[in-house]
Image: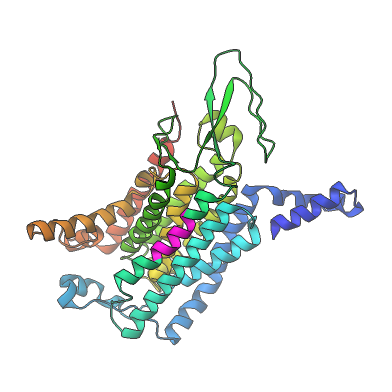
Amino acid sequence: MLYLIYQWWHEASQSGASWAETFSFLRIFESITVRAAIGCLLAFGLSIKLGPWVIRKLISLKVGQPIRTADEVHKLAELHGAKAGTPTMGGVMIIMTVLISVILCGKLTNPFLLVTTAVMLGLGALGFLDDYTKVKKKNSEGVSSRFKLAWQAVVAAGAAIFLFFSPNVSENSTLVVDKMEQGTKVEAEHKQTGYWVKENQQVREMKISEIGFPLFRETLFDLSYLAIPFFIIIIIGASNAVNLTDGLDGLATGCTITTCLAYGIIAYVAGNAVVGLEYLHMPFNPQLGELTVFILSMVGAAFGFLWFNCHPAKMFMGDTGSLAIGGSIGTMAICTKQEILLVVIGFVFVMEAMSVILQVGSFKLRGKRIFAMAPIHHHFELRGWHESQVIIRFWIISIISALIGLVFLKIV
């Protein structure tokens, strides 16, 4: 809506309308940074305002979190027994506030903004169904894992196919700038944005199917049509990784904030010709900057949710929030062409998922467990760490991981 207001003002200014000069301040809504900041603050403010009402509503609907029994988790049941009945499905608030912020502050024709929002809504719907099933059955068993995986695959496949075949994403493509021989000057006009490169630079295209890493100027390889299953794996993997991390008060929410902030910086820079192209030599697409509006709206919503989700939590996000957030983060990584960097920036999510994979694999192959319990945050709880210690220390790891990921952006 804000961008439409800018367009309305701009058209009036171009036509010489007398009121346009008076309301010249409306030009600020062209700025991605302004709209992203407004989106962040709006999502945060809405979350703070709506939080108490959402909690009361969830309590009235008796949407309480089922806690696994002592037979299932042994000592952990003693540690988490007090959490039983805490309202879950709070992820609805995250999705709702992000959606409102994106609609009001985003350029809704932007393909990156659209696909990330669609993934959030699609996986949020799956999480809602899963949480509702748990509450209805009054146990920790939601929808079947096979059904959940199938739904995730459909949503992820839709996003992957859209990104691969969309002309605004692939054919007009990402650009990378390489240095040419001294004394050569190139002025290359981008066919959509009027972007041009000067001072000893050469422009070449980087397709959406190409995979790179920030430390290397050249792409590592081109997956071609294999990019579609690769993108599907990333979205499903990220969705489940955040879901596994969401086991302690505020743990997944805090890590979401640091991860999204890092990708917000990447998205903005990747859409900025001067910083992204000329200085960092990053994969560049002039439309990527708009994704920052979605990402910072997610940051604001996560901060607002953390207000009520910090220990001791007054509500949980449930699968409604964790599946939606994880899928969104995976889609951000694909859109910015920093898929491999997600392993670094989202290290806590990766660590949580890998602990489950290793635990299951070790038990099936050797009949022995590696950790006291998986995901790994429960291992440290059972080893004597207080819940708050686990959460804050994992937040610290997430912050450091995000900073290391941003350091990798500079290509030497």
Q: Residue at x 67, y 41 (%)?
A: 192
Tell whether 368 sits left or right of 314: left
Please tell me whether residue 276 is drawn above or below residue 24 in the rendered image.
above
Q: Quadrant of residue 233?
A: bottom left
Q: Which residues are magenta?
A: 152-160
**Residue 8, x across and y down, in percent:** 79, 55
Please tell me whether residue 196 is drawn above or below residue 109 in the rendered image.
above
Is 220 contained in the magenta span? no
Q: Main secondary structure of the magenta part?
A: helix
**Residue 297, x across and y down, in percent:** 55, 58
Please tell me whether residue 102 is drawn above or below residue 170 in the rendered image.
below
Q: Is residue 311 visible?
A: no
Tell whether 256 sits left or right of 201: left
Position of the C terminus by quadrant: top left
Is 159 contained in the magenta span? yes
User: Which residue is nearer to you in this view: 183 or 208?
Assistant: 208
Q: Residue furthest left?
A: 367
**Residue 299, x across and y down, in percent:** 50, 57
**Residue 43, x across and y down, in percent:** 56, 63
Q: Residue furthest front?
A: 225
User: Which residue is nearer to you in this view: 286 or 344?
Assistant: 286
Position of the N terminus by quadrant: bottom right
Tell whether 358 sits left or right of 167: left
Q: Residue at x 47, y 51 (%)?
A: 332
